[in-house]
Image (tube, coloured by chain):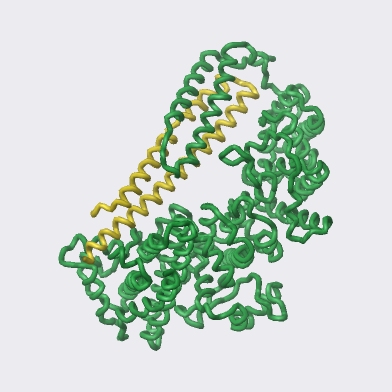
Amino acid sequence: MAELAYDPARVALLRARAVAALQHLGRAAADDSAAASALRVAARVRAGIENEWLPVIDRVLASVAMLTWTTTAPAWVQGRRGAALGRALAARARALARDTRVETVEAMLAALRHASSDDAAMRALFRELGPDGLLELLSALATTDTTSTALPEALRAAFVRTCAAGGLRHGFARGLVDAAAEAHVRSGRDGAHALTFAYLLRGGQLPTTFLVDTARALVAAERRFAGQQGLQPDHGWSLWTVSVRPPHALAPELADPSGLLAPAAGDPMYALLAQLARDGRAGRVVFGDHDRAAYLFGGRDVLADGGAAIVAAAATAAAGDDVGPGASPRTLAQASLVASGFVNHFGRANATRASGEVTALAAARIVGTHLYAADVALAAPGVTDDERLGALDPADRRALEEAGTLTADGAPPVTGVVALPHDVLGPDDPRPAALLQQEPLGHVLDLAVSTDMSAQLLRGALATYQRGLASAAAARLAAGEIARPDRYLAEVTADAARLDARIGQRVGHQAERRGRGADAALTFWIRAIGDGGGRLGELLGRPGAAVVRAVAAPVTDAATSALADAEREAAADADGRARLASEQLAYVWARELHNAGVIDARLPAELAPGGVLPAYGELVRRVVAHPDWTMERVLRALDVAPSRVGVELDIEALRDAMATAQLPAYRELD
Amino acid sequence: MPIDPDATLLRRRAADLRRLAAHLAATPLDDVLRAAGAATWVSPRARELTDRLTVDRARLRDAVDDLRLHAHWLERQADAAEAAAAASLAVG
């Protein structure tokens, strides 16, 4: 029975709506370069309506062609269901790989839609077809009819649904990898099967176990290829190089916004990394293996897209939403291990050549979440990794040796998670954290501050971290745990100031590298020292140092602004920068000391409601609203604030010491 | 609040991006998709067009999100510039 294929009146209405959308998109305009990408997307949507929708609608309105079309399932699936239906589909699908005439494709599409809600049929289809059959069919469809993607899209959707429901046979992932690799080589590297495999991975989210299996198989296949070809093991990625690429219907989905095929389109690893960037648990398993982490982060080529896919995948595993407050110690340890592998391998091999906003933001997210580890690694610049290793707790050292990350001859560990002490917390309270090597960490830091947005993200995380350190120190002082408060504070505040300046120095260098000039970047960096809170987290993903959450006290108030630059010109030289930054940082510490009850600044309620000092930006706003007060007067009040716990503290001296600690880093920029 | 020329420029850019985001977000693609249902036409080609427009709609939404993200970032930069100007007044 033929179905009525269209309603002329409704099609006319559809045409009117399509034209309205077309005209609306035609009015989209902006001069700002930041709008370029969005305008390209709008142009692409517009072109789709203009060049595809309207011609089809007009043809329908002008003819009766659609009356002959049918969406009823073909006779060979009628009356079948379950596994029998799946087997029938598989038999036709295998034949379809050799016969891709339009009518057979459309019949298959109708049959697939007819069966799509029958889970047993879908399981049987993919079991019968197998990974090589699926890949072969999709590749045949994509290379014989390079304009239609309806059936490949329907097949991919069914594949993803079946995979997510656990309906694929064990080993399917490995089978797909091996089939793609073999077909690619067998075809003389025409790239069709590799592109098809990447297309499959670019569909809906696949389950964790499938992704882990795929990653294992992909790395194994690449290494096997390298071995067979007599290449260095790290050159296994060259398995996917392409000689002559034939037209492929699925290529547009893997294209850049410009319409050109993305450089990494035919390398399935990038598509897999895109999946991992949405599944932190899978990423922690994949990158948690030392050997695989070394290959993916530091061996194999992963820079065809500027490093965006690998760094995004690492960021989700090491610093994703599930690596936050409430995460289990196991998850935090696994995330730290990924961070260690990423920094030590990617930092050494790739960070200096990586580029792009996405890459920089993801790197900033990793460092921003693992600041405790970074702080410890950077704390003693004169200490070598070997010396740090020598100071490790024997139990940690044994654990690293057992994990194979530390060789018996004492070579530096490649990756690891160890209990690291911090001066603020004291030697009796070490915290597990990623073991980061100084030199690669420096390269990753450079990447993390290489764009304005990524520097801002890291700034927010560091500000939160600094406040967490101040809060932890204030709590220890309030509890009377510290025998020599003045010496303790002098040491830990100088360390905090040094850390801020050392990263600030990199911000300045990166700004100069981009031709932006260091002054503006550093002014921003220094102004925002007092800015730490939730807003950036809501915007760009949580920047809070989750792995140091035990250190960082809850930051509940919205630190709404950045801002301690009283004289813009003063930040133009090292002394000015150090002085302004130390004032900002000293306020962060004085605020926590005051709020913890260590000192009493005796400020009026208009400035410190309920006796609680606000974030610096808020304080500035309150001072502006009260003509009797100036910031200078507030800072003086903090300088002379008496102690409530019987300790003598000299905030002014601390501020001077912080400035002194920051000077070398800022002088290096002048 | 003192007027900072940098902040004014940043806010103007942010406003432009937000204006474009609002315009793109108001693109009546939902109307097209609603009108393209099975009651209007049924065919593999129609389904293909609908599927593709659904993907395009998602891309357009992503682009709108990106524009708003960028605008938000520009506004924060403007906040910082203005607050710095306020701070200089307070200290001075």
As drawn, A409 above or below A50 = below
As drawn, B83 above or below A488 = above
Whether residue A330 can be seen here = no
**Left or right position of B30 against A110:** left
**In which quadrant will I find the N terminus of chain A?**
top right
* Between A512 and A480, the one nearer to me in the picture: A512
In the rendered structure, the colour chosen for chain A is green
As drawn, A143 above or below A267 = above
In the rendered structure, the colour chosen for chain B is yellow
Residue at image point 54% right, 68% down: A442
Considering every residue shown, the one lying at the far left of the view is A628
The picture quadrant where one finds residue A129 is top right
The picture quadrant where one finds residue A496 is bottom left
Relative image position of residue A492 (x, y in whole percent): 42, 79
Residue at image point 66% right, 30% down: A150
Relative image position of residue A526 (x, y in whole percent): 37, 65
Residue at image point 79% right, 57% down: A226
Considering every residue shown, the one lying at the far top of the view is A63
